[in-house]
Amino acid sequence: MKNVLEYLEHSAGLYSDKVAIADVENRLTYKELKEQAQCIGSLLIEKLGVTFGMTNPVAVLMDKCAFSLAAFMGVVYSGNFYVVIDAEMPVERINTIFEALLPVAVLTDTAHMDKAKKLKLSEGGIVVGIEDAPKASDIQSDKLNQVRCNMIDTDPVYALFTSGSTGVPKGAVVSHRNVISYTTWYTDTFGIDSDTVFGNQTPFYFSMSVSDVYSSLSSGATLQIIPKSLFSFPIKLMEFMNERKINTIYWVPSALCIIANWKMFQYASLPHLKKVLFAGEVMPTRQLNYWIENLPDATFANLFGPTETTDICTYYVVNRSFADDEPLPMGNACNNCSVFVLDEAGQLVTPEIDTETGYSREGELYARGSFVAMGYYGNREKTEAAFVQNPLNDKYPELVYKTGDLVKYNQYGELVYITRKDFQIKHMGYRIELGEVEAAAGALSGIKACAAVFDAEKDKIVFVYEGRKYDDKEIIDGIGKRVPHYMLPNVIVRIKSMPHNQNGKIDRKWLTANYETV
């Protein structure tokens, strides 16, 4: 197998009339999904032509819906790779992404056509309306086959842009081989099959959605898109899950905590739910225990990994009890993915335990194998800094990914997460470089100096600035023009003068500890 389209075509052959993906208003069977994807692929080939030896980016600007998946697969059918753009993202930040991406086209719909036309495309770049796709009877089969014959498993499928420390987002490029290797592990490990009904919570521009999408396509499962609004009304959320007979979820912990914090199992049950998977941020054990108490026969698993490893590189299936204040482990490496830990001196950290602490030495987590992405699109400097020659191998070329995550081993030989090595944080399920928040605020002329820090205990982004006094709303509005909503500060503090450390840099550690009293 060399192409993710084989997943769609296989399932369309076996489960032609079965629902592949559904939102509140629409649903597509596997047959319809395949036909729509091929129609969109035909449209893109007509507009862009057929290229050889190079796979080009096509940005997809749409709301999250059933037709989104047809758009993604249509881009792949055209011989290009897709880049999901958050439809609510400010135009300025999209243009920052496009400076690196240089997409050959933006694929959009009528609802977002005006916004698409405001974007700065590369020379020759075009805006393509999805509604212009031909009917199924006009699919360009010969051209689709011509494109397909020239595709290989190291061609990109998609790129996902994550926050960048300099204010410039980084686009991790993921290949067919990456997705196929990862999906094989995911479906095998969690028993995903044609009876699986996913309740999708994460946005399609978030790497966690890759697991929902491709494990569904590969196994003939059904993917139910849960409306974002329902997470504000937990009883309606549970009613929706029961109505759609959702039996598998893979959510960020903050979404799971909504049900736990409101003790919703007192008012409703989830009889169909058999698998509860989570990733993206630390899962509070107290809330997890509430879920386990109310779904004692379900499988619970903590998944861990960055976008640069397709989605996940380690996992832990919960198989023992944890006290409410005891952290969950990250577990061990996924099958066909290897991880190792190096200390500051570059020495391998082994699972040998210190009897006083109950843990090993700490170090940075590295990942290797077929899950590891190809690098950052149009950003050689960042790629070479993060995708490096394996420090443990000096015999042949082998690129590995430096995750920037500090970890240690526990007494069971499982990895335990400590923190980020740099300024990147995990907040509301998203990986965020605080430097991007600072860069966005730099456009406010009255700010002399600023720092964004993270209060992990309270899960709050704190923005501290020196300069003229702004209303909090002015700062939020200014930053909000350049970054998505989940990166906006939760606390804003004005300070007379910024503290600096011995290196002359803003002392972020001091600010994190003292922002409430300055």
Image (cartoon, helix red, strand yellow):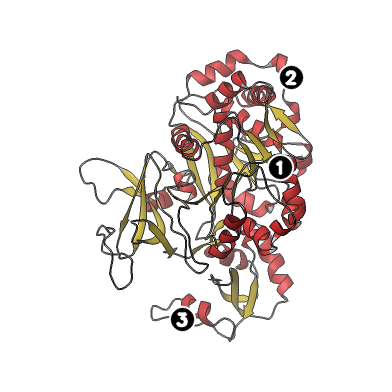
Most foreground residue, 104 or 429: 429
Q: CA distance from mark 3 to mark 2?
A: 63 Å
In front: mark 3 or mark 2? Answer: 2
- How many marks do you count on the picture? 3
Q: Nearer the N terminus, badge 3 or badge 1? A: 1
Q: Nearer the N terminus, badge 2 or badge 1? A: 1
> Residue 500 bears which disc, if any?
3
Mark 3 crowd level (few <14, some 14–19, many ≥20, 10 Å Cα): few
- The amino acid beneath tag 2 is Lys
- The amino acid beneath tag 1 is Ala
Left or right: 362, with 463 as reference point: left
The residue wearing badge 1 is: 116
Q: Is 504 located above or below residue 289 in the figure?
A: below
Residue 109's spot in the image, x, y percent?
74, 36
Q: Is 137 located above or below residue 172 in the figure?
A: above
Left or right: 441, with 131 as reference point: left
Q: Nearer the N terminus, badge 3 or badge 2? A: 2
Residue 47's spot in the image, x, y percent?
65, 25
Can you say which quadrant of the picture contains the C terminus? bottom right
Residue 496's spot in the image, x, y percent?
59, 86
